[in-house]
Image (cartoon, helix red, strand yellow):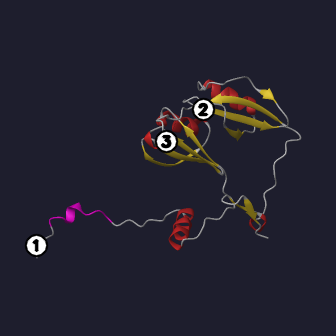
Amino acid sequence: MTPDPLEALRLPIMPVEPRPEFTASLLRRLRGARAPAVGRGATVRYFVADLDAAVAFYRDDLGFDEELRPSPSFAMLYRGDLRLLLSVPGRAHALPDGTLPDPGGWNRIVVEVADLGAAVEALRGRGIRFRHEIVTGVGVRQALLEDPSGNPVELFEPLAGYHERAPRAAKEQPTPDLSTGEREDRR
């Protein structure tokens, strides 16, 4: 019997174990079911001038996990329940008159840190630019820094009297119907 000349090119079969979150999400989509609202945080999109610099900043300096980077103009990162979408402005984002979004502005994400002074010192040591010194507000100390594209990021440290909403069980979470403005009560 003559050996198969392509045998040397065959790759070994490797078992794949996808993340449980991915498989659950895939099954929901295949069944046409909606994703559960519990445990899902906010999604924020920032427009950036340099995707590589922005991903490195959020991943290496602020502790985000890089989830996905399917193209040179888009990346998805997570920090806890916050999903951060980074986009390089392009034709898909243009207004009808051709205007493209600019990075920067004053809207921002807010990231809690345990020791604001230490975080600011460490980030300044890495060359991160801050818009102002640490200030004390109602229940928090905060500092405003900029990502490599000029988008602001607020770091804050809770003080005595800081209030955080207690998590609610899934059956207590109302689901807003954005088409009507009404909330579905799951109780």
Which class describes the residues within 10 Å of circle 1: few (<14), some (14-19), or many (20+)? few
Q: Secondary structure at mark 1?
A: loop
- Distance from Cα at disc 3 to Cα at disc 1: 58 Å
Q: Secondary structure at mark 2?
A: loop
Q: Position of residue 110 (x, y in %)?
A: 70, 39
| Residue type marked 3 | His
- Distance from Cα at disc 2 to Cα at disc 3: 17 Å
Q: Secondary structure at mark 3?
A: helix
Q: Are the residues flagged by discs 3 and 1 in contact, CB closer than 8 Å?
A: no
Q: Residue furthest left?
A: 2
137 relative position to 146: left or right: right
Q: Which residue is mark 1?
A: 2
Instruction: Check residue 11 for magenta coloring.
Output: yes
Q: Position of residue 70 (x, y in %)?
A: 43, 49
Camera-near label (3 vs 1) is 3
Q: Residue furthest front?
A: 97
Q: Which residue is mark 3?
A: 93
Magenta residues?
A: 5-12
12 relative position to 36: left or right: left
For the point 83% across and 32% down, the residue is 137
Q: Which residue is mark 2?
A: 151
